[in-house]
Amino acid sequence: MTLRNIVKIDEAKCNGCGQCVSACAEGAIKLINGKARLISETYCDGLGACLGHCPQDAITVEQRDCAQFDEKAVGKHLESQKNVCPSSPAEKGFVCPGTAAKQFNKKDSASGDVSSQLSHWPIQLHLVSPNAPFFKNADLLVAADCAAFAMGEFHSKFLKGRSVVIACPKLDDTSPYLDKLAEIISNSNLKSLTVVHMEVPCCSGLTRLVQQAVAKTGKNMKFEDVTVGLDGKVKKTEHL
């Protein structure tokens, strides 16, 4: 037992919508008898990615003595759930196919090839596990949601060869992001870190978030900060 953060679910507030089940990349929450329940303390990393998905505010993060988070146990649990697709998710609980971690083998593209360079799933920062295997020894790209739509060369110029997480500092609930990014940076032995955001002022919040996450780790890690204009061209590149 150790003192740490862990998810707490108020069953009196829970309406059984199941959104937290889909949001939990570790599969730590299931719907049982129409209520969301934490099925194992060892599956919960305590970062609270599920909080922003609960319309009833039934989920909080508390600090208490509990079993340690076990990444290996989570991996076995998720593997066992891969082929589970119950006809009644409200009764049995399930791992949403949209959040199940996947990696893809990408071969070098031929000249002129515009194939997708996405190497893994999920990519939304709320959904990824900070202990996902695709972060280990990776070149990490932290990108604003809009950047890939604005820039025609995004896949070939920035995404190729990198693991990616995306976020919107203006519209997302970013409260869990700082701890999650810090954990990724601390535990993954990253080879490099790149931030790509739009030139609009609110989007620079992504840079500040990454700066705070790096500072929280205590590491002296530099990263490349790229500003993309509304015309899809790189306006500025800095090394921070």
Image (cartoon, grey):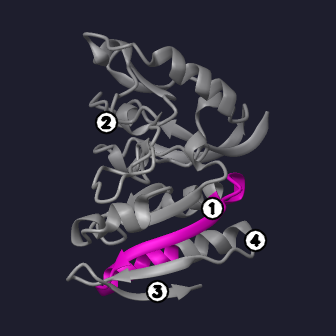
* 94 vs 173: above or below: above
Residue 239 location in percent, x, y? 57, 85
For residue 218, the mark is: 4
Q: Residue at x 52, y 23 (%)?
A: 78
Q: Residue at x 52, y 70 (%)?
A: 194
- Residue furthest to the left in view is 231
Q: Can I make out residue 173 in this image?
A: no
- Asked which secondary structure carries label 1, the reply is helix
What kind of residue is marked 3?
A: Thr
Residue 94 location in percent, x, y? 38, 20
Q: CA distance from mark 4 to mark 1?
A: 10 Å
Tell which circle, 2 or 4, labels the residue nearer the N-terminal end.
Answer: 2
Q: CA distance from mark 2 to mark 4?
A: 34 Å
Magenta stretch?
Answer: 185-209
The question of residue 86 being in magenta is answered with no
> Would you name the residue on which mark 2 appears?
19
Query: Can you tell which of label 2 and label 1 is closer to the viewer?
Result: 1
Q: What is the quadrant of residue 189 in the picture?
A: bottom right
Query: Quick check: marks 4 and 3 in contact, CB under 8 Å?
Result: no
Query: Can you tell which of label 2 and label 4 is closer to the viewer?
Result: 4
Query: Can you tell which of label 3 and label 1 is closer to the viewer?
Result: 3
> Would you name the residue on which mark 3 appears?
237
Tell which circle, 4 or 3, labels the residue nearer the N-terminal end.
Answer: 4
